[in-house]
Image (tube, grey):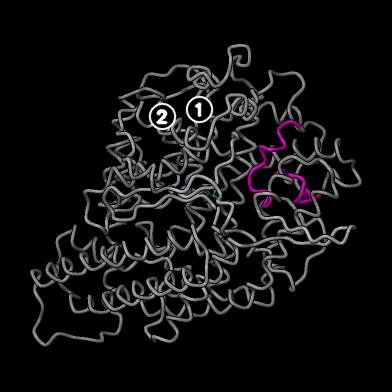
Amino acid sequence: MHTTKTTLRRQAGWLATVLIAALSISATSQAAAKPTIADAQRFMQRTEKELERLLSIRERAAFVNMTYLTEDTDFFDSHFQQELMAFVGKSVKEAVRFRGLKLPATLARKFHMLRINLDLPAPSDAALRAELAQIASYLTSTYGKGKYCKTGADGRRNCRNLGQLSKVMATSRNFDELLDAWRGWRTIAPPMRKKFARYVTLANAGAKELGFKNLGDLWRSKYDMSPEAFEKETERLWKQVKPLYRDLHCYVRAQLSKHYGADKVPLDKPIPAHLLGNMWSQTWENIYPLVAPKTSERAPNVTAALLRKGLKPKQMTKIAENFFVSLGMPTLPKTFWNRSLFTKPRDREVVCHASAWTLDFKNDVRIKMCIKIDEEDLSTLHHELGHVYYYLAYRGLPVLFQTGAHDGFHEAVGDLLALSVTPDYLKAIEILQTSETGKPGLSFLLKMALEKVAFLPFGKLIDQWRWHVFEGRIKPREYNASWWRLRTTYQGIVPPVSRSESDFDPGAKYHIAANVPYTRYFLATILQFQFHRALCKAIGHKGPLHACSIYGNKIAGKRLWKMLQLGASGPWPEALHELTGQRRMDATAILSYFAPLHKWLKEQNKGQRCGW
Ligand code: X8Z
Ligand code: ZN
């Protein structure tokens, strides 16, 4: 924020370097005559048109695949993925001939966006490209179909999917039952290990052809700054929030130790990973009842209220839609309601991991989610609709700009609204009753922290691992050991049973199997509070940040919509400035949101040996 001009200049300088790098990839087709700016414009026009066509075919194939997993839909998924990869690869190389031209800023940005468009670039060799696309489909659908099967004492074989195992993780308080579910889900991953290693090799080769050092280098190049500067930026933000995480960890460990015994949860060691209410220990709100302070108000039981109301998945979605509409945004198109997948089908395999889609870059927006009637999914529905409204807001832009200011923005929008799903708001929409809501205080904040603060190190470490894998610093023979080293260092957790290199625990997390970059969620967790603070200020909220709700506020809605409409048409600091008046990501907002809790945690932790 304090270096506005310098930052911009630095960014402009960096963009120039990137463009030169992009354009200095060995040219495959150098035009004889020196091309003009008009040639570059025409090239880009053609490219955008074809890209939009290929993307919307690919998205349709992927949507059908994920909502109806068969060998044939896997085939189509990888087929159209391949076509897209081939086209982007070829176009980036052709763009080399515009090297040295002084392009208008928007056009130059399009060339940059084209080069960083894919999360999964492929080698130009057709056979290798096909192999990569097939591996990618295989990994995603293997994850989607994953089940833990065992034969019971009665000789009957019983299989459970991720949804069923996650329910155990969320609700059971039995050490061994939790362990069984935790270990069981991880049996789906070892078959992925070899394929994953091959995917690393092939995707790296693809990234190199586009002029990147490796795939991680490409992923880190998507933030309008150098990959090195971006890595430093994530470190800076992590350092800001680390003390808060440490104190939350310390408090939670002490409570778990009381419940399970100090032999199972020692007070100065990392926490066994299966006791935190979540399959990956990524958010901990499900163990709220175990760690709730006895002295403060009780956070309301939203899940019980939703069940009491007898809500159905579409009605839950309507609640989330209503929030966006209350801000002055449009209702969702009819096709959204007809074409989305809201419930897990009984008769076929699907990828249940929630996602949001734009199929035609215009109005055909959808979600795919196996909705459960509970508080977690009410929050996830806001998250998914955040993506959907972003798609709708920027649908008028050229396809290359139809994406988030950066991917962390895309992940932060729906979460921003969910921050305004306060007990008072739930009372206003008649989910909670007056008797269930007092002033949100420490208990409410603790529950929020179990969701948001607990997530931070997880959000950071996933790509820490992958960046090292893509760089070759982590070799296949140390995939699992390095994974657990990071999990312990960042999160302060340990596997509850010994693990070895015949396991492949990273593959039991969706985004690793499905090649979805993850740092975005770390950034989003920080950004959503920064957005929240700015909007609450704009609407004149007085009092603590956690009691603010932007529900129904058109001023807040207008301001947000304006930022969403920018898509990626300019560098993200501009979009951030539009909404917050700041040009840097800033963790002081999440820190001040949780400041009263942090103070309380420090008091609770007095006399404890925090850390691990
Ligand atoms: O994957 C998601 C969303 C879809 S973009 C449901 N999230 C991350 C996860 O589940 O691991 C949201 C928060 C983190
Ligand atoms: Zn998301």
- Which tag is nearer the camera, tag 2 or tag 1? 2
Query: Residue 136 at x, y = what percent?
Result: 50, 71
Residue 422 in the image: above or below residue 283: above
Left or right of 332: which side holds 68?
right
**Foreground of the two, 124 or 79:** 79
Whether pointer 2 and pointer 1 mark residues with C-beta atoms closer than 8 Å, the reply is yes
Callout 2 amino acid = Phe
Binning the other alpha carbons within 10 Å of mark 2 as few (below 14), some (14 to 19) or many (20 upward) gives many
Residue 501 in the image: above or below residue 236: below
Query: Residue 569 at x, y = what percent?
Result: 25, 52
- On whether residue 277 falls in the magenta region, the answer is yes
Query: Residue 34 at x, y = what percent?
Result: 10, 81
- On whether residue 404 falls in the magenta region, the answer is no
Callout 1 amino acid = Val
Give the labeled residue for mark 1: 421
Give the labeled residue for mark 2: 323
Extent of the magenta region: 269-289
**Foreground of the two, 26 or 28:** 28
Q: Which mark is residue 161?
A: none
For image coordinates 30% across by 80% down, the residue present is 25
Residue found at the very far top of the displayed protein: 435
Residue 499 sits in which quadrant? bottom right
